[in-house]
Amino acid sequence: MSWASRRETTKIEDLAYCLMGIFGVNMPLLYGEGERAYARLQGEIMKRTYDHSLFAWNYNFPTTAYGSSNRLLERPPQGIGVLAPHPSAFSGCADIIPYTTKTEPYVTTNRGIQIHLRVLRHSLSAKPHTRLAILQCRYRSNLSTAMAIPIKPVYRSRHLESEVEYYRSADEDLVNLEYSLAAESSSQNIYLHEAEPFWQSEPQNLYRCCLHKYGKELGVQFHKALYCQYPIVTSTVTGSIVKQWNYKDNSAIWGDDRRGIRAALYFAKSNGPAFVVVLTLMHLSTKRGYPSMHIYIRTVHEKIEGPKSTVLSQVSLRKVLEEETPFELAQELDEIQTTFPFESRVMTVQVKREIIHEEIVFILDIFFSGVKRSHSESNRTP
């Protein structure tokens, strides 16, 4: 690759096609594919070798190596693929050799190149990359250092246990690393973006609370709900910050730019008792960042008479949200539940945290066990 780094061809594709014989690979000639031909050549080489020096190149290729995309003209990419976009990236890399020991196999997947490498984390503010992926190759003339490529994790939900998908940092060359530092790194399976520049607007981390079950078979009706930012600011309840519940899918959505939310959900039976479930979901400064969960239930009326419109007018959820509700900071919880009597039955309110498509979802269920309570127990204040 270093030998071919200064070679010029009339057609872009021939920069790759003319090297097939040198590397002993075959692939279809697709004139018109442009710069993609060089990435395809490297993909064919990967199928035949363990050689990590294929990833050992510097950021010294022409700006047109990725084509003439308008996005390249508008702003620089956030990162690039681990495969070189042009042979000129290997200029000055002739002294790089692989270790003779075979490494674990790597393979191309729909998430990128799956490969087992040592990854070293750093916290240098002057460097845009946050990790160094240590390759199984070195300079022929330098036995005391390891060779690494600067990488940065693809933006993923911070609630997942690990970050395994990376792209190579743009505008950065190979990094020579002392073996003592390389030994401190952990070995793991990661995915490296294969080719092409990488842009991404980091999406907001979202949380969702969904009402799942609430005893419809026993005649309980879910009438209305409101939620607002927590801790509640003075203007929240009286102003327009209180959010309407999404009744289409019975859920509320909020971002992690807030410390948490408080929601009030109103349930009642036709011409019967009513209750409000108040949920407080609050962020804690913990390693994983999962919000804590708290449930508070209060009885609104022992007996409500009249049509639905009359029932709804008797309860103001804005006032419920404004009232001081007990909340104790606790540890991170995957599940929490509480019980109280309702019509001589035991009612259990449960909130369970799940991760669905990288989004934290709190599932709210209300169960009626059917266990009869004594009259004295059912009159206790929850």
Image (cartoon, helix red, strand yellow):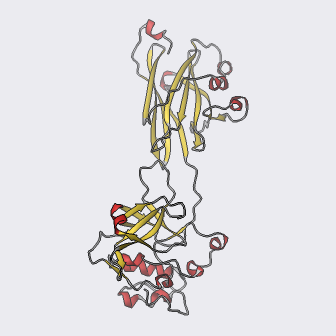
- Which quadrant holds residue 183? bottom left
Q: Position of residue 372 (x, y in %)?
A: 40, 13
Q: Position of residue 228 (x, y in %)?
A: 63, 34
Q: Residue furthest top?
A: 376
Q: Nearer the viewer, residue 330 or 108?
A: 330
Q: Nearer the viewer, residue 19 or 173?
A: 173
Total numbered badges shown on the rendered structure: 0
Q: Position of residue 170 (x, y in %)?
A: 54, 70
Q: Nearer the viewer, residue 257 or 211?
A: 257
| Residue at image location 52% in from the left, 72% down from the top | 172
- Which quadrant holds residue 27? bottom left
Q: Position of residue 370 (x, y in %)?
A: 41, 19
Left or right of 311? Residue 177 is left
In this picture, is 258 found above or below 162? above
Residue 213 appears in the figure:
no
In this picture, is 83 found above or below 336? below
In this picture, is 167 found above or below 33? above
Left or right of 20? Residue 231 is right
Quadrant assignment for the N terminus: bottom left
Q: Residue furthest left?
A: 101
Q: Nearer the viewer, residue 98 or 309?
A: 98
| Residue at image location 67% in from the left, 18% down from the top | 314
Residue 102 appears in the figure:
yes
